[in-house]
Image: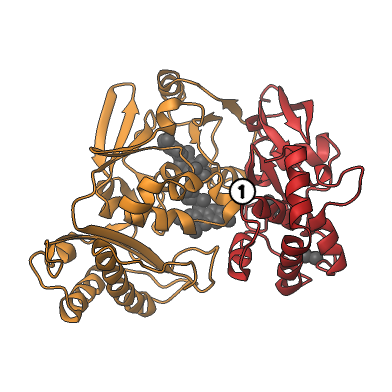
Amino acid sequence: MAKKRIVTTTLNGNQTEFLCEPRQTLLEVLRDNMDLTGTKEGCSNGNCGACTVILNGRPVDSCLVLAVEAEGATVRTIEGVATAAGLDPIQKAFLEGAALQCGICTPGFIMQSEWFLSQNPKPTEDEIRFNLAGNLCRCTGYDKIVRAVQDAATTWQDHYMKNCHEKGCH
Amino acid sequence: MRDFEYEAPTTLAAAIELVAKHNGSARCLAGGTDLIDQVRVGRLTPDVLIDVKKIAELNVLEHGATGLRLGAAVPCYQVYGHCGIVSDYAALADSCRIIGGVQIQSRASVGGNLCNSGPAADSTPSLIVLGAVAVIAGPKGRREVAVEDFCTGPGKNVLQPSELLVELKFPARAANSGSHYRRFIPRNEMDIAVVGVGASVVLNDAKDKFVSARIALGAVAPTPLFAKAVGDALAGQPINDETIAKAATAARAIAVPIDDMRGTKEFRLHITGVLTERVLKAAVARARGEHVDCRIGH
Ligand SMILES: Cc1cc2nc3c(=O)[nH]c(=O)nc-3n(C[C@H](O)[C@H](O)[C@H](O)COP(=O)(O)OP(=O)(O)OC[C@H]3O[C@@H](n4cnc5c(N)ncnc54)[C@H](O)[C@@H]3O)c2cc1C
Ligand code: FES
Ligand code: FES
């Protein structure tokens, strides 16, 4: 069997080491080795976006990243989104807009939306839908999700940008 | 997933040595958006994955008076985020904007799209029409292959087991030229092309005649298809609906699509004609400096 590797990353702001096999995906290691089970597995082939995390400032499907590739990288997962002060505006918007049912897709949608709003704080509906094309939801339907992102964009725009800036996540 | 070793060489020489040493049992890993799933489901059974993303030569992105150099591992988001590519190699930017969703584009490379050698690969027709040349390196040195000669069958290409793709080289954009790529899919995003068409055109100074044209078709043959004769026939022709319709008919005539779950042969032939017309018109518009609305799904 291939030798295990020690991988050093900055995970949700903390320098973190983990041991993994080359064949393990980042998704597997986050969930099984690190107990960070907020990141979900839907399809394991890049189609559903449930496993979306932010790797070096870009959203990726963690099921299509090898954990060893995260050596020296910055990784941000859903566990790093809320702060001691409470939920992030985008999380609040999903909650208040009932933009989830079973919730399996939600961490992926939140990671992708949060990243997107940091790039494009005033998106059109078209832009939101295009940005979320790599995230699938089987229960809620997309309208509520899109509306939650719109709400987050308008209601909490200032807070969001400030918060994000303070966290230094992008 | 299958057990394998992982190597991440930081020099091209080290990568070539590793690829050659494992002669066929190693695979290059760029963005992994094809490879990781293919290993997971057992379609590929490599013993070693060689991560090529730490090699400077594979990350080049240089645009100047002599043309464009695009490292094999440069991900899609950097391609469509590059102003020089958007303005001078527009078809390539069009392709990279529609490969997967945003998460896929963070990782998927043009080099990986080419080396995976799928008949429906969305960036390959654009590479062909823009005259890109693949720079390949192996233990015996370097060689160059025009992209239209790179793929040899579904999932097959001219790379020897001991070779890897280093970069894609493009000539400088000609005066009065424009390009476009477009595909048909049943959804708005995130699907495999039923048919894809790329075109680049060079016009005369009056911008009412074709000086030359290159057209390439995706998903209608075992490999992305360079429709050389179709483009050549446009040289010297006036730009009007009739000459463009003739090109579309000629494109349909060389397409050899199959029936599958994405579309019948007949449907694919029809779409080949429709897209050839639309793509040529958009390439002409760009050559004339007009804006082309190519929002995805429109
Ligand atoms: C959800 C999803 C949606 C997708 N949508 C599209 C789409 O719309 N259009 C499309 O065309 N494709 C699509 N793809 C396929 C894939 O994303 C593209 O083909 C992508 O460009 C592959 O690039 P990569 O860098 O991820 O390659 P990898 O997966 O890393 O590699 C692909 C192949 O090329 C080989 N390789 C890579 N680099 C080199 C090199 N430098 N030298 C030699 N061999 C090399 C690898 O060994 C492997 O066999 C999609 C994939 C997923 C998962
Ligand atoms: S689990 Fe990664 S995209 Fe579905
Ligand atoms: S809420 Fe169940 S998949 Fe989206």
Query: Residue B11 placed where, x, y %?
Result: 45, 20
B236 vs B176: above or below: below
A4 vs A35: above or below: above
Q: Which chain is orange?
A: B
Q: B8 and B3: which one is in front?
A: B8
Q: Residues within 10 Å of mark 1 (few under 14, many from 20)?
A: few
Direction from residue A32 to residue B281 in the image, left or right: left
Name the tint of chain A in the rendering. red
Direction from residue B238 to residue A36 in the image, left or right: right
Q: Which quadrant is the N terminus of chain B positioned in?
A: top right
B170 vs B202: above or below: above
What's under tag 1, amino acid-wise?
Val
Q: Residue at x 34, y 44 (%)?
A: B157
Look at the image and tell me whether residue B8 can be seen: yes
Q: Residue at x 84, y 45 (%)?
A: A37
Query: Residue B288 placed where, x, y %?
Result: 24, 65
Look at the image and tell me whether residue A40 can be seen: no
